Image (spheres, rainbow, N blue to C red):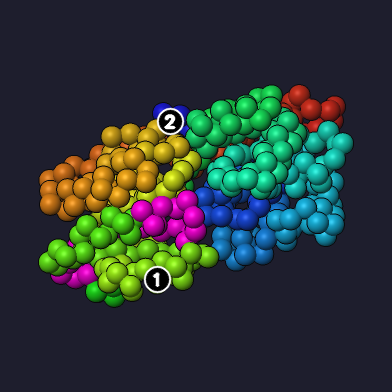
Amino acid sequence: MSRTVSSPPAPLIGPDPLHAVQVLGSGASGSGVHVRSLAAGLVARGLRVTVCGPESAELAYEFGAAGAQFVRVGPCADVESLTALRAVCADAGLVHAHGTKAGLLASLALGGRRTPLVVTWHTKSTAKGARARVLQLAERRVARAARIALGASSDLVDRARQRGARDARLAPVAVPAPRWLPQEEDRRQHKARAELGAVERPLLFTVGRLEENRGHDVLLDAVWAWRSYDPAPLLVIAGEGPGRAWLQGRIEAEGLPVRLLGRRDDVTELLAAADVAVLPSRWEARSLFAQEALHAGVPLVATAVGGVPELVGDAAELVPYGDPQALARAVLGLLADPARREHLAATGRAQADCWPTEDDTVAHVLGIYDELTHTSAPGSRAVRPH
């Protein structure tokens, strides 16, 4: 996605600020970080923002600290959640849901109201069988209920259109770049490597929920290829999920140089300490981890799936999903080629500089809000970003 020109913060014109309700489903990392950034930007530009989602999302992203009101709303369309969301949306000028689950909840809560609904598609389901059919029906309802569907990647825009969206667009989704001084970065890197036992051996890092479709099984297959190296590269995986016991059992049974770290609040520091970042997923839209790796100048090996190629361009080594040999070759090739790693680090930072900034993203969303509130029922407020 090419970078757009950001608009400077502009106050809302009119006596009353637009009330923009942001609805989160599970509060997953990508959408949670995006909504935190969006909420802060909208509040700074004079809007009244309420974020609705699970309590865990507020604990993780502190929307209140960004100037937004937070209201606990569960991710399921039960009576309690719908009642709470309807009350919040009673005076909303616009509702913006993030994800299919949040979009379904918002569409049910709005019912027959004329309040404009925007839904950002951050990801897609990889379910199979009966569950896949149910989710497809949910996607159809969400796509048709939204006045505008925004996709974090081109394939998500296509998916929204296939499900019946009347207006689907590619949308910038920015994440904050790490902020610390170079000397502080060096100190954190050394501390992280010492903690992990990788001071004198290569360190590989990935993060993600331990579940099917994240590609951890393929990644362990690739680790088998370098287990006998001296010193063997150490792979560390941050994240938690239902697949942890299976992965740990296999690591121990096969003697693989892999550590499962569980949930961590120092992912940025761990990533910056790594020699290579690895993203083995079956599908990604605008991967938060890939963005963080390129921002940090850490060489990235990723699967060429979903929105990853358009996100990283030539700034990463791309391999097919499900091919452990290709994954191992790419990782080992980078570890053996310091010049290539330096090139990817520099190219990655340059690629990240071309991505939309947080200001760009807020300006784009404000433009959509302005478009919808101008064309809504008489008397609705309008936002006028300059």
Does residue 377 appear to the left or right of 314 in the view shown? right
Q: Residue at x 19, y 70 (%)?
A: 199
207 in magenta: yes
Residue 45: where, in percent of width, then height? 61, 42
The correct choice, above or below, for 57 with respect to 134 in the image is below
Residue 363: where, in percent of width, then height? 56, 34
159 in magenta: no
Callout 2 amino acid: Met
Disc 1: which residue = 248
The residue carrying pointer 2 sits among few (fewer than 14), some (14 to 19) or many (20 or more) residues within 10 Å by Cα, namely some
Front one among 222 and 166:
222
Magenta segment boundaries in residue numbering: 198-218
Q: Secondary structure at mark 2?
A: loop
Q: Quadrant of the C terminus?
A: top right
Q: How many marks?
A: 2
Q: Secondary structure at mark 1?
A: helix
Disc 2: which residue = 1
In 3D space, how far apart are the residues under numbered discs 1 and 2 (Cα atoms)?
A: 38 Å
